[in-house]
Image (cartoon, rainbow, N blue to C red):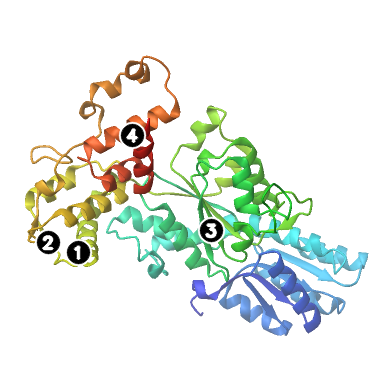
């Protein structure tokens, strides 16, 4: 038997002897955002195709009458877990009863019930996918398979746990459902989102947006766009990022910070694949694949009343959790060498060596900012290293010591921090006061390095600079 590989997979197999119906149905699926479709104009090729390909759904055209009945029976007999939807231009009750008894999951009259065909297909794909996912994941793990290693090239690791995560990512990458990526700041959530996009081979582009700090108006306008005259200054129609990501992937980062109204709109987008541009009462369909990420515990947010339970349930079908760098310390030497080489090229220097003391200290450091923090620290150290021969603890001054790596465990944090906000401010402070305090403390720890302070706090250098200017102006 021919070995089945991901290249031999498709979500939907269309079978029809009528080329006109075949093209109409294929276009209907494409318009609905289901792009993994194979069309067969010769029904005799169906069973050989199924023997050599993994298929999630068969749509069988019965317009020619009972001619395809034998094929339907064979598919349902030989592939009992494979859903089959029958479509026909004939509203024949007798035929519909026969098809359902033979094992079809639905009988749809086209073109009158085109919307029902797509809905039935999406239900069949969503209901069938967990069975295929479990089977595929078992195969990946037992055989230690990793087919699309190139998709993870940006994620440098030698950790066995990470390889298992790569394998799960390959399994869910082509699922029609949303994927939620969790993990602390700086672990590489967007890199995994990009890997999913590459593996899924969607025709559209990868579009990324960090939704943290967006109020509902900005969220709606950014994602859904607006019609002309929707608000003051809206002098022309504008598409949003959902439209930009058509037939591609839309990556929404930091969704745990969305407000209630935005969560409702996100739920509708995920559930109905529909949205309204700002100021418009005309619904638009989305064909974008949705991948989301958060660095907060959404279940805790639910308990606090800050995140919708129904939205969480919609998100948790496929969840990828990326471990913190301190949980995969074996990756630190590889990452260190890679970041040193990259920084040296950037600054036009020879790549410096690393002292044994520094290697030991880094291997024991907790890296609260994870891979992003390590990259920022290395870049800063290489930039400041004038000798160009060897990086030492001096190049990471204020961060690590030879005796004990600097950690952010409670015992290493100033007492003033652990005393609580009331002990710090004598009252409940404003958000701006807390932000200013954190920036000042991060700069103390980093000995004035904006890059390192930004990596610790999970913000950009520009944010640090902007906040400091506002502090100085007070």
Residue 195 visible somewhere in the drawing: yes
Q: Identify the residue under disc 4.
A: 472
Query: Where residue 321 appears, x then y in whole percent?
Result: 42, 48
**Structural distance between the alpha carbons of marks 2 and 1:** 8 Å
**Structural distance between the alpha carbons of marks 4 and 2:** 37 Å
Q: Nearer the viewer, residue 272 or 79?
A: 272
Query: Where residue 108 appears, x then y in whole percent?
Result: 83, 64
CB under 8 Å between discs 4 and 2: no
Classify 254 as above or below 3: above
Q: Nearer the viewer, residue 356 or 220?
A: 220
CB under 8 Å between discs 2 and 1: yes
Classify 214 as above or below 285: above
**Structural distance between the alpha carbons of marks 3 and 2:** 46 Å
**Of the residues under marks 3 and 1, which one precedes in the sequence?**
3
Farthest front residue in view: 473
**Of the residues under marks 1 and 4, which one precedes in the sequence?**
1
């Amino acid at each position: 038997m021919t070995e089945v590989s991901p290249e031999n997979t498709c979500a939907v197999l269309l079978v029809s002897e009528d080329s006109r119906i075949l093209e109409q149905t294929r276009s209907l699926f494409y318009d609905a955002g289901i792009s993994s479709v194979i069309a067969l104009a010769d029904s005799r090729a169906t069973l050989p195709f199924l023997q050599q390909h993994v298929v999630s759904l068969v749509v069988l055209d019965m317009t020619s009458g009972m001619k395809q009945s034998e094929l339907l029976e064979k598919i349902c007999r030989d592939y009992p877990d494979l859903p089959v939807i029958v479509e026909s231009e004939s509203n024949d009750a007798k035929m519909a009863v026969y098809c359902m008894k033979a094992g079809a999951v639905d009988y749809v009259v086209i073109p009158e019930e085109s919307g029902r065909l797509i809905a039935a297909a999406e239900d069949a794909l969503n209901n069938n996918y967990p069975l295929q996912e479990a089977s595929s994941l078992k195969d990946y793990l037992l055989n230690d398979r990793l087919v699309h290693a190139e998709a993870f090239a940006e994620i440098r690791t030698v950790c066995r746990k990470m390889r298992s995560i790569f394998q799960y990512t390959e399994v869910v990458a082509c699922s029609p459902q949303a994927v939620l990526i969790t993990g602390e700041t700086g672990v590489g959530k967007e890199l995994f989102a990009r890997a999913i996009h590459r593996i899924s081979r969607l025709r559209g582009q990868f579009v990324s947006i960090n939704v943290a700090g967006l109020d509902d108006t900005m969220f709606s306008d950014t994602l859904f766009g607006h019609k002309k005259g929707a608000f003051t200054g809206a002098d022309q129609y504008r598409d949003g990022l959902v439209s930009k990501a058509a037939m591609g992937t839309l990556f929404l980062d930091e969704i745990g910070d969305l407000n209630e109204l935005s969560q409702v709109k996100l739920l509708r987008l995920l559930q109905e694949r529909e949205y309204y541009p700002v100021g418009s009462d005309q619904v638009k369909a989305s064909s974008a694949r949705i991948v989301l990420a958060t660095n907060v515990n959404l279940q805790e947010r639910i308990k606090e009343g800050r995140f919708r339970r129904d939205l969480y349930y919609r998100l948790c079908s496929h969840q990828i959790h990326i471990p913190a760098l301190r949980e995969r310390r074996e990756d630190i030497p590889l990452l260190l060498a890679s970041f040193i080489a990259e920084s040296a090229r950037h600054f036009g220097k020879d790549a410096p060596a690393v002292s044994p003391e520094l290697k030991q200290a880094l291997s024991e450091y907790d890296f609260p900012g994870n891979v992003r923090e390590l990259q920022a620290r290395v870049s800063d150290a290489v930039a400041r290293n004038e000798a160009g021969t060897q990086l030492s603890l001096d190049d990471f001054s204020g961060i690590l010591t030879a005796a004990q790596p600097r950690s952010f465990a409670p015992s290493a944090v100033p007492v003033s921090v652990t005393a609580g906000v009331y002990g710090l401010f004598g009252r409940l402070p404003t958000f701006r006061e807390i932000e200013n305090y954190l920036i000042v403390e991060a700069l103390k720890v980093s000995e004035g390095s904006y890059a390192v302070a930004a990596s610790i706090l999970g913000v950009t250098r520009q944010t640090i600079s902007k906040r400091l200017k506002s502090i100085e102006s007070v």
